[in-house]
Image (cartoon, coloured by chain):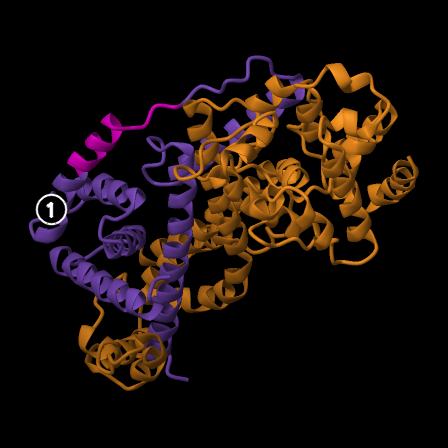
Amino acid sequence: MRNQSSVKQEFLRKWITGLRRYSCEKKNMSFFERKKAIKLSADLAMASTRDKTTRWSQALIANNTDNVFIASSSSSSPKKSSSSRSRNMTTLMRRSRPTRVKSAKKEMSSARCIAKRLMEKRTRKLKNLLPGGESMDEGCLVAETLDYIQSLRDQIEVMRCLVTASQLIINPS
Amino acid sequence: MEQATGVLRGSAHDDVVLESIQFNEEIRGIMAPAPAPENGSSFTALLELPPTQAVELLHSPDCAAAAREPPCHVNTNQKPYLLDSYGGNLTFPSNAALIERAAKFSVFAGENSPPEDAARLAPTSLSGAVKNEPQETDSNPCSTQGCVSDPAVETKNERTPKRKEREKKGKGSLKKSKGIADESSGDGEKLPYVHVRVRRGQATDSHSLAERARREKINARMKLLQELVPGCNKISGTALVLDEIINHVQSLQRQVEFLSMKLAAVNPRIDFSLDSLLATDGSSVMDSNLTSMATPVMWPENLADGNRQHYQQQWQFDAFHQPLWGREEANHNFMTPEHSLLSYDSSANSASLHSNQLKMEL
């Protein structure tokens, strides 16, 4: 699969760069602002490590870049271009969404209806969870979920390491 | 006739052996173009085959049951097409899987076989250039391997137990084949293009095939997901698996939130010294992270000193250092719930601490 440690390193580097940009732009931030900044930069860094190969990463960048980095003066150029690119990509993707082939089955038993409804509910839930998941069809959704889960796991590991590391620094006991 | 009765007994025994092989379509395929001799009493008439061939066909399952080697000598005396269709392989594997594989090969062989084979196989439409599901290829081994004691023996009484056996297999798409027409509808695509396993009785137009291929792709990916998400392997049923996946994704997202909150709590400013973090940036930052962090670097020292001072002295300090010590205790609380993912509880804690600190400032 992916080279785990290199992905994590890349993520860490990007994240810290993002955080630094945050820190120099605003000196005093409340706790929640800081938390939001940290999370945002982490998410964006994770998304950018995927290099726009996945839809969720593009959607994540597109959704967040508008709010944050364009507003700030020191917006990283790759992120800005990525936002415009990702916006184009999302529109393109929406346009080229594959049309569903209607099932040839004409009659559906009630059990099948129920099962179908259950599945629809869950897929909708999953779509809501996944960034940019609304415009995905089922096959894409499953693949994206796979990738997203892996990325989230990496992100969590890196963050946890950073937390313990910084705790050790502050509290060298 | 002795042979016939012997074969009858043998075939009854062979039913068990050849249970996994389904002959019905083959039988019907053979019988359909020959309606006249259907009511004939002799098996050969049913088969519409010359007696010699029938004998050889009838002999073969006996061989399969008794010894694994077929009476090749018998076959060689007969028409060579059987040899051709085997590709020289006349052994009757008892294993159903082998039978299926041989069936597929025989199907291929059947494609390229001389016209007489084609003519012979033509009535059984399933033996066309079709890559069928293993169960459906049973007809092909029947036709080519000649282990067709069942068609030979086939009476109306025999047919029903076979049908029941087959339906016991649990293939939902199997429907009772009524004739060749049904069989032909069960054919899949031609071989060199899309390798799609087609079940019997399902439509074969391109739309449904594409849909089926798509379905299979999705199912493969779902299996991967199942392996990835812990605890999903034992669950059967897509809805429950999806539930688990959704829970997992939600928990991961909550973890991220929680960790970012923790980081915000631990660090007064978002100011990570990149140098220290990437000091030992060799192959694994993760391993070296903790060790490199332990070495004192500029800003942590200042921070530590400042914290101690402010803790000892007063609260007029910058609000950011206060939350540090307030959070220190909270962090200990955080440690335990961290893995129970009570991030919302911790946010409540931090919020309360924040409010306390604000009160103190005032």
Count the labels in the image. Answer: 1
Q: Which residues are magenta?
A: A87-100
| Image x and y of residue B133, in percent | 59, 38
Q: Tell me the residue at 53%/61% (across/down).
A: B339
Question: Is B1 placed left or right of B165 in the picture?
Answer: right
User: Which residue corresponds to the image point at 26% horizontal and 48% vertical from the top-left?
Assistant: A53
Quadrant housing residue A111? top right
Q: Is residue B234 visible?
A: no
Residue B328 in view (yes/no)? yes
**How would you rate the neighbour count of disc 1 (Cα within 10 Å): few for under 14, some for 14-19, many for 20 or more?**
some
Q: Colour of chain A?
A: purple
> Image check: B102 left or right of B165?
left
Residue closest to the far front = B77
Q: Residue at x 55, y 51 (%)?
A: B87
- Give the chain of mark 1: A
Within the image, what quadrant is residue A166 found in?
A: bottom left
Residue A2 percent location from the top left of the image? 34, 62
